[in-house]
Amino acid sequence: MIITIGGNLGAGKTTLAARLSRALGYEEWYVGGIMRDMADEQRMTIEEFYKRLRHNPELERSVDERQAQLMREKDDLIVQGRVAWFFAKGSPFSVFNIFLAVSPEVGAQRTKQRPENHDAETIETVAHANAFRVKLELERYQTLYGIENFLDPMHYDFVLETTALTEDDVEQKVLAEIKKRAG
């Protein structure tokens, strides 16, 4: 099974992907990690990198093609990415698309804890940066792939609101849903 994980910023996607990888023995692939590494290599913030992607769509398409190819070739894979569900459509394996939702306030609190956001002065600063990033991503995916709203829960098989949940709660609920679907 291919498991894709998408959702709101700060919803717990990275944590869930790592936990599911350990629990299921699946390989984990993090599209955002590739983008963050590329930003670091160019000595820029992730927000600056995303602005640059607007002017270099082929760069993003090359990363996206790598994830699409991976999902066509490998089973037992967890792919965390904004539009992983979109590229999973071409996979010959069964696919389970998970969306993690979180309130903007809690999402900002969680993303402020990341090392790259430690210098942010306030939660409001992080919330503003998150909102700006989502705006850019909505525009990019519309332009690149014709996706109206990559955050629309209708694209997913399972939606979980994580605002009031612990990491353990999220993992348990998702694993229960995977087991239910696997029969």
Image (cartoon, helix red, strand yellow):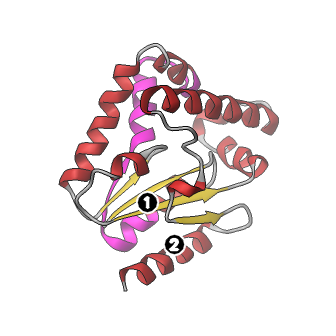
- Of badges 1 and 2, the one in the foreground is 2
Whole-percent x, y for residue 128 in the image: 75, 31
For this orientation, the residue located farthest to the bottom is 183
- Left or right: 81 as drawn, with respect to 115: left
Would you identify the image quadrant in which residue 21 lies?
A: bottom left
Q: Which amino acid does label 2 sit on?
A: Val
Mark 2: give few (<14), some (14-19) or many (20+) Cα within 10 Å: some
User: For this rendering, which residue is in front, 155 or 124?
Assistant: 155
Whole-percent x, y for residue 51 in the image: 55, 19
Mark 1: give few (<14), some (14-19) or many (20+) Cα within 10 Å: some
Q: What element carries label 1?
A: helix
Residue at 77 percent across and 31 percent down: it is: 125
For this orientation, the residue located farthest to the top is 55
Whole-percent x, y for residue 152 in the image: 60, 50
- Secondary structure that dominates the magenta span: helix
Residue at 62 percent across and 45 percent down: it is: 9
The reply to whether the magenta stretch includes residue 41 is yes
Q: Distance between the residues labelled 1 and 2?
A: 13 Å
- Which corner quadrant holds the N terminus? bottom left
- Residue range of the region highlighted in magenta in the rendering: 19-47
From the image, tell me which residue sits under label 1.
18
Residue at 30 percent across and 29 percent down: it is: 62
From the image, tell me which residue sits under label 2.
174
Q: Are dots 1 and 2 in contact, CB under 8 Å?
A: no
- Which corner quadrant holds the C terminus? bottom left
The reply to whether the magenta stretch includes residue 70 is no
Q: What residue type is labelled 1?
A: Ala
Earlier along the polypeptide chain: callout 1 or callout 2?
A: 1
Q: Is mark 2 on a helix, strand or loop?
A: helix
- Left or right: 5 as drawn, with respect to 168: left
